[in-house]
Amino acid sequence: MAIEEGEAMPLDCAIIQEIYDNGNAQEQFEFDLDQALEAQRGIIIIEPAKLGDETARWITVGNCLHKTAVLAGVSCLATPVLIQNDVANFISIPMGTLSIICASIYGVSWQFDPCCKYQARGSVCHTCRRHQQRLHSCLHCVFFGCYNLGHIHDHFRLNKHFLAVDLSYGAVFCFACNDYIYDQDFETVVKEERLKASKFLGCNGWEFTPWEASRAEVSLLRRSPRRRRVTFNSTIGLRGLINLGNTCFMNCILQALTHTPLLRDFFLSDKHQCKRKEGRYQSKEDPKDQCLVCEMSKVFQEFYSGLRSVHIPYKLLHLVWTHARHLAGYEQQDAHEFFIAALDVLHRHCKGHNGTSGNNPNRCNCIIDQIFTGGLQSDVTCQVCKGVSITVDPFWDISLDLGPSGGQVTPTATHTPAPGSTPSAQPDFNDSNSSGSSTSSSSPQEIETGLMSPPGFEDVPHSLDDCLRRFTRPEYLGSSAKIKCNSCQSYQESTKQLTMKKLPLVACFHLKRFEHSSKLRKKISSFISFPHELDMTPYMSTHRRASGLRENVQSNRRHLSDNRYSLFAVVNHLGTLDHGHYTCYVRQHRDQWFKCDDAMITRATKQDVLQSEGYLLFYHKRILEYE
Amino acid sequence: MADFSERKLKDTQMKASINQTLIESGEKERLKEMLRNKLIECGWRDQLKAYCKEVVRRKGLKHVTVDDLVSEITPKGRELVPDDVKKELLHRIRAFLAQQKELSSENIPY
Amino acid sequence: MVDSQLLGMFDIENETPQSETRSVEEDILEELVDELSFGLCIEVHRSCKIGMFKIEEEDDEALKEFKIIDQPGLDVFGQPPLKKHLECVCPSCHRSLSASRFAPHLAKCMGMGRNSSRLASKRLAINSGKIDSDEDDERDIDWTYVLQPPRTRRMKKEKPVVNPLKRTKSSKLGKNGDIPSVSSTNSDGSGNGTAPVKLSSGGTPLYDSLSLEERKRLLLTTCGVISEHTKKMCTKSLRCPQHSEEQRQAVRRYLLGLEIDDRVRLRSDGTVIDSDDIQVDIDTYEDGDGQALRDTLSRLRWETSSSGNPSPTDSTSTTNSNEGQTKKRKKGAKLTQRKKKRPPPLQLVQSSGHSDVTQYDIANG
């Protein structure tokens, strides 16, 4: 048997492999293992598993010789503990003034940590030979016993070894106190080791750890004993906004933003460090007053402060208008436009704070980009050579057409059926999908190409899914819109397909209810159903690419990322194009919904929300992956 | 009867070895992480934590022990797991076991 | 060794019925769930032992205090729909004004919007003392000329002189049972409109001493009916319920003379015209004239909204009237046309310019 130590591996890891070719295998193996232990490798992998298991058992059974060699080198703090063990009279020691226990654990943690680590993976209860039932390891000697069946207790009674560590969470049980005890130093070690372990296991190198107040936070919390918590049936987080004179468009967006969970977490944890305060301002105004992110932060404070009075967001309006002059001031009335403008200003103001790569919009890691930016992939396929040219553009929102596809070409055809009077013949989108040449026009250029839908073919979307299917299906760009194909080196007819390359954490869907063509202006009030839970997987680039292998995708999906979204805010436009009002539904604390109508906040039901017309739909990703 | 007890013994042995495989492959930790995420997502954690706090309040901050908590929380925890989470996890465990079976029948050098 | 066992186990698994296998998986799942429960227990227990539990704990009082109130007609805080008048200070010109009129004010103040940037820059120039009647056409010059007095007055107003005035007015309004914080509103709105009020409050019917111009301004915003007992003018809004239309018309006739007829007609128009039109009227107005007049206008607007307006701009209805950007644009276009037709009268008859204002204010009140 020959054993190799993997040089290629990171220093912290040693691989010992067994090859069946040598009579002296056993000795050789032991020697190598010893070396690895002495080198204090973080992880020792022994292959094949059979030998690994054997080794683990062999260690646990108590071949202490190798271990003591290692342990002696690790810490001299071990000595007092060992002496105590030998004397075995610690029962008489007063039940642990905490300091003594801490001291001994400290020693113990250093002493035993490498040992526990190596043993943990293959360890079983020494009594019942199982590794379930809350396995604990004695901190005085080499013994593993389960807690649920009382085997570690037996060990204590027999040997008076009163400290044992839980192997799943690293908590230390003290039989003297008859409870778990917590020591800072020990916990630090545990945290480090767990992080290493989870990295090794490929759990994205990250593990869930519950929030814990830092020392500074603790003192802060002690000083201010009042707590605000968003709980069921609590008004915390809700606040009316005064209408500053037709500013319901802003109020809605503000309500949606303040109820965006991730954004809320960012602002309420005081993550924004404004660089603008440090001099680089141009105006005579107080520089703090120039940063929209700072102002947003204040708005969040206002919302979650518990105040009931109406908030006046006049500063925010001023800042947005100051920094987005293209909004043309009071003329600006569209909630969607305001949303995009506000994001843009926030994004720009964040940039100063990160100080990185302001040039590349894809590379920004400001909070706005982290939350709202997605990547839209556009595949233009040449109809002659079938060559595909791919571009990916960042996006903050997805604008979805509601009219009949191709209908905008001839104004006479843009007759939106009134809600409820829609024709029964509903086109099958999957079919039109595969045909590839089905028509759709979503932007003015395309309208000009003279693209026409088949006569009588009226595919008016009825649901958000319809809209998204239409959005992501291939569209024929028409004979008059030839695009230069790189492989053909000539202008060819082509199809274009949009898909989601990267999904944003918060997806904003904009239903294009306001139609402004040259001859026609109208509001499309047809009912578009939208789900409470949305799965974006079918609109992903990866999914569409593999659409031929649908089966495959289905089965792989489980292992791919989770693309489910939950609805958390809906902005509605009531009225007509000429006279209207914006209101907003926001979700808070799981499934409580509230209707925000400027200063008036009232409770709403999920049904109210899902039955509403919908102008802007905000979805939040359910599962966030660590990056 | 002897057959039955033998069978039962084998059964526990089998479970033990499956468990061993799960641990050694790291799959157990991965499953745990996945389950943890799902349970946080569905509010299980929050619910259970609120329940924990209730127990603490009942028993008194000074006197509450982990055993107290475990005995009350464990059954509650099992009960509160939503069915779809269960289903998904079971599916994944099953998939893993099937994969292991294939591997073990192919790779053992005997 | 273990592997052979394992293999054997899997063989067994092959033979065992499906239910058995399932129970294995369920065992595993249960174990995982238990382990997570245990983790949570440890976490909570730990927070108890290291003293964090108390810190994270919210008090029950707070929970009760912030409980949602479910009552029809009230919001979640248990408050009825907003009736109160709120104020804010414009970050651009640092004047205090009614929050519900903030957006339109800001648009003008910042010189944003379709036509206003030119105006704003002009105002800047005026404020800094450099009056340039420059590029504008004759009409503009005319108006600048006409409106010179108000501008100077306004500059004076920034001096402490304003203070007594503010007090008087606010106490007066306070009596009317209105907005408590009117004083600040007034400080910015203390244009020509307020001066008479101050005078009249002195006890003697000093409106006689007002110039025609000043009277007009005053009557644009307030009810103005002169009390028989106190000889004071009513400072409430144009729709003040205490006095009738007839009374108002009479007082206008009395104070302003024959021009009144014109105004009355316009006013009756005004009641029909919705605020949208009015909004645009201002634009029109601004288009062809000087900054000072616009200033007066906006001041008059604040005046209206702050001075005892019985129905402070109901947010919903206001919003409704102005919704939809396209509409706005369309209106704008329409107005531009109107404006083009109008200039001559504006130029010739001073009062016709004010009729525009009247129209606006009436509708707004």
Image (spheres, coloured by chain):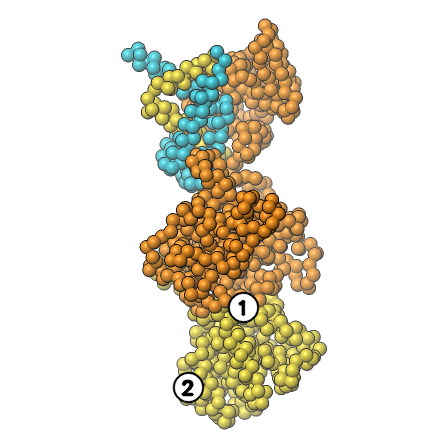
Chain colours: A orange, B cyan, C yellow
Residue for point 38% across, 28% down: C26
Type of the residue with mark 2: Glu
Q: Is residue A186 visible?
A: no
Mark 1 falls on what kind of element? helix
Mark 2 nearby-residue class (10 Å; few <14, some 14–19, many ≥20): some
x, y percent for residue C71: 35, 59
Q: Is residue A206 visible?
A: yes
Residue A574 to residue B48: above or below: below
User: Which image quadrant: the N terminus of chain A?
Assistant: top right
State the separation of the CA atoms marked 2 and 1: 35 Å
Q: Which residue is mark 1?
A: A331
Q: Which residue is mark 2?
A: C245
Residue for point 53% across, 14% down: A51
Viewer-side residue, B28 vs A148 = B28
Q: Is residue A101 left or right of residue A309?
A: right
Viewer-side residue, A318 vs A230 = A318
Type of the residue with mark 1: Glu
